[in-house]
DNA sequence: CGGAAATGGTGAAACGATTAACTTATGGTG
DNA sequence: CACCATAAGTTAATCGTTTCACCATTTCCG
């Protein structure tokens, strides 16, 4: 910038004002400075210097559970990012991806890059209550918007009514006449074990999502006079195909449901594949319903609960940018709806599932 | 850092050395400093200050064509990011997403954030030859690795043999006996028009990918004694469902192929959907083959060309980090292979397609 | 025409860290 | 014991901007 200033015959202050489009410098002068800069191959104020002085860096982050490695396989994450990127893009703000964990080494505090100011603010997606990183973000007052969870933290949030969505989902299955129902829930807490659980275990879930959705399932069951103890519940542990596969196998080995209800389309799709492998037809032998309405749901004809993921991203980014600008927007609630496709149907007369293979 | 130094009774230099794990400070001292820092809620050196002085910022970027908005819908982009994130994550380096365009306003140079140092280096994905941003990156000597295109720039790259992959794809279709073949190519140049093109138009393509793959198609056609003029070629313009839909419609309205060959699974899937809408069955009425082997291909049973996208990301990140560390690694070539699933079959005897609807 | 307000610009002090060069202790060695 | 390498710190210069406080002009208005 010093060089540009010298070449343009002005002070560095003027160049700085020119690039920040301040009215302190005339339009003609500004143009002149721009062309000098272009000639010298100066691309604009160095981010580090600028950020050091101004405190702004021009990037926002999205924090995803565990590692980006897994998150990028989950369409509900990439679509959320898409929504955030849409808004960020038009505001000339870059999008940076962070893992929530890295709690490993005691040397480096968890996920220091966020705390150390690599971004101006963050969208926190689906991170469990009380996560140390979230606590640290709150403690430092880093602008943040929470998507899905933990709603409790006093941070602005955008969310859906998970309980209601889940209710719709289970209600659909029960209304079709199913009574032997398997539930695949993504994860209850920090651990990523894949195992059967009872309705009682569920109360201890630290994941708000899971708690709410299960509450919705139970409410629907009660309304249809189905004792919640009769629901077979398996927790997958991770939101990916492999976990969905395993959860489905565990569930099918332990029970003989006529319908499968999953808290994620990823798991519903995995379940569908496993059923196919075992020679069971959807929806004739078994109904399957997912949650999210990921693009793949439409392709496969999976019944599911629609939630506007991209819009959630847009809303989160809008709130975040508002906050960065000193605003005080605080929340945004989205609607869910039932989408019935080809994967759900009434149970067959002979309600005993056919032999395997 | 000054406060931490004071509280620990050492100089700021010592604190800095402690955080950079230099041997200039003893292990016990380092531990003491860490605990003082933790007490004071100091999360580590501020990125802006650190970067200003050291020139390193601890983030790498990925540049995607046009806007992240569209890119995040393309699984081959998100899977690439996944691969990059895997490597970056273990090196404690964040991943930032950039659009390649923003060439709009003459005020702000295109995509200044990269040039202005928001990242230490970039992975450039699928950006056309001679793009001004790429030129600027080369001119400034910003460490970069190119994935897929433009291989010409003298930058290190990771790629597949596009021509060979395309050859495999077309050869499969031709070997099944198809002679009336439609091709959906993603994009030839900067514009995102959706239109039919001739084999001659194709020579002018600025997208290396498209050029190479079409060359592969033509080579296979020649080897099977099918004149390239008989291929119906439509360019989609964008890599998303909508563009795939439109391209398919245009193609079907203009020709009556028995097989559809797409340069992307996204388009192949879109085509499949359109065929279904028109009452055509895959592969009975028409064969469809894609490229990439995105996760959805397996789900739907789409025949396709497999390429190791996540590995490409890993390779790109590895090369980039090596470069950032002063290394000189330069390239990595990946293999492709044909994956035959349920969407391709020999053409039917009555090779005239049934009436629409 | 005098003074106030607007316009366009400059000087210089931060911002928070890194690191070369220097200074002390502390042992080890011939 | 004198000498020197090594370990463990410290000092101070520097990275590139932003922005507050000032300073000239020019314009406007009663």
Image (cartoon, coloured by chain):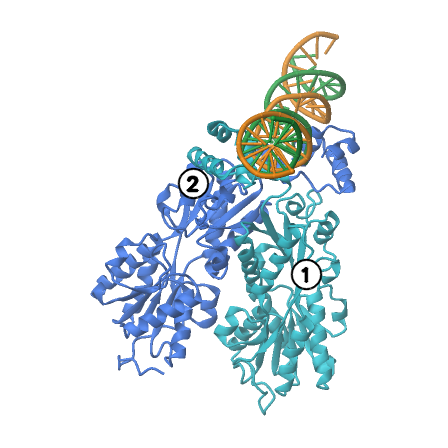
Chain colours: A blue, B cyan, C orange, D green
Q: Quadrant of residue D16?
A: top right
Residue B322: give x, y in percent of width and height: 64, 54
Residue neighbourhood size for the residue with mark 1, other residues' Cα within 10 Å, grouped as few (<14), some (14–19), many (≥20): many
Task: Answer left or right for A145 relative to A351.
Answer: right
Q: What separation in Å lies between label 1 and label 2 (alpha carbons)?
A: 39 Å
Q: Quadrant of residue A220?
A: bottom left
Q: What residue is drawn where x is 33% and y is 57%?
A: A188
Q: In the figure, A26 relative to A274: above or below?
A: above
Is disc 1 in contact with disc 2, using a CB cutoff of under 8 Å?
A: no
Task: Answer left or right for A214 relative to C6.
Answer: left
**Viewer-nearest residue: B173 or B184:** B173
Q: In the figure, A81 relative to C21: above or below?
A: below
Q: Chain of mark 2?
A: A
Q: In the figure, B95 relative to A222: above or below?
A: above
What secondary structure is marked by label 1? strand
Residue A258: give x, y in percent of width and height: 30, 74
Regarding residue A222, the answer to whether it shows in the image is yes
Q: Which residue is mark 1?
A: B157
Regarding residue B48, the answer to whether it shows in the image is no
Q: Quadrant of residue B290?
A: bottom right
**Viewer-nearest residue: A48 or A320:** A48
Q: Which residue is mark 2?
A: A136
**In this view, which residue lies farthest toward the bottom?**
B349
Residue B57: give x, y in percent of width and height: 60, 44
Q: Chain of mark 1?
A: B
What secondary structure is marked by label 2? helix
**Viewer-nearest residue: D4 or B156:** D4
Q: What residue is drawn where x is 38% and y is 59%?
A: A192
């Amino acid at each position: 910038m010093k060089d540009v200033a010298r070449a343009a015959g002005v002070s560095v202050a003027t160049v700085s004002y020119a690039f920040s489009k301040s009215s302190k410098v005339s339009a003609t002068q500004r143009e002149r400075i721009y062309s000098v800069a272009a000639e010298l191959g100066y691309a604009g104020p160095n981010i580090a210097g600028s950020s050091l002085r101004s405190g702004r860096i021009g990037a926002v982050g999205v924090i995803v559970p565990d590692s980006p490695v897994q998150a990028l396989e989950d369409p509900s994450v990439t679509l959320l990012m898409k929504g955030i990127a849409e808004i960020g893009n038009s505001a000339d703000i870059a999008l940076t991806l962070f893992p929530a964990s890295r709690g490993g080494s005691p040397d480096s505090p968890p996920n220091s890059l966020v705390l150390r100011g690599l971004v101006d603010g963050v969208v926190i997606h689906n991170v469990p209550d009380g996560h140390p990183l979230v606590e640290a973000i709150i403690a430092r007052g880093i602008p943040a918007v929470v998507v899905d969870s933990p709603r409790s933290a006093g941070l602005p949030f955008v969310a859906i009514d998970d309980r209601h969505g889940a209710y719709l989902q289970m209600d659909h299955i029960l209304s079709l006449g199913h009574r032997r129902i398997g539930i695949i829930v993504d994860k209850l807490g920090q651990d990523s074990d894949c195992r059967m659980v009872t309705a009682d275990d569920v109360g201890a879930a630290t994941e708000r999502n899971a708690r709410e959705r299960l509450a919705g399932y139970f409410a629907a069951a009660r309304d249809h006079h189905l004792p919640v103890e009769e629901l077979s519940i398996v927790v997958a542990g991770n939101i990916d195909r492999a976990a969905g596969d395993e959860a489905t196998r565990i569930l099918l080995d332990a029970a003989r449901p006529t319908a499968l209800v999953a808290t994620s389309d990823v798991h519903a799709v995995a379940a569908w594949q496993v059923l196919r492998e075992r020679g069971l037809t959807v929806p004739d032998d078994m109904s399957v319903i997912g949650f999210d309405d990921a693009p793949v749901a439409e392709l496969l004809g999976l019944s599911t609960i629609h939630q506007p993921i991209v819009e959630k991203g847009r809303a989160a980014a809008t709130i975040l940018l508002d906050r960065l600008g000193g605003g005080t927007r605080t929340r945004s609630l989205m609607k869910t709806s039932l989408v019935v496709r080809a994967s759900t149907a009434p149970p067959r007369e002979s309600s005993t599932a056919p032999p395997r293979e």
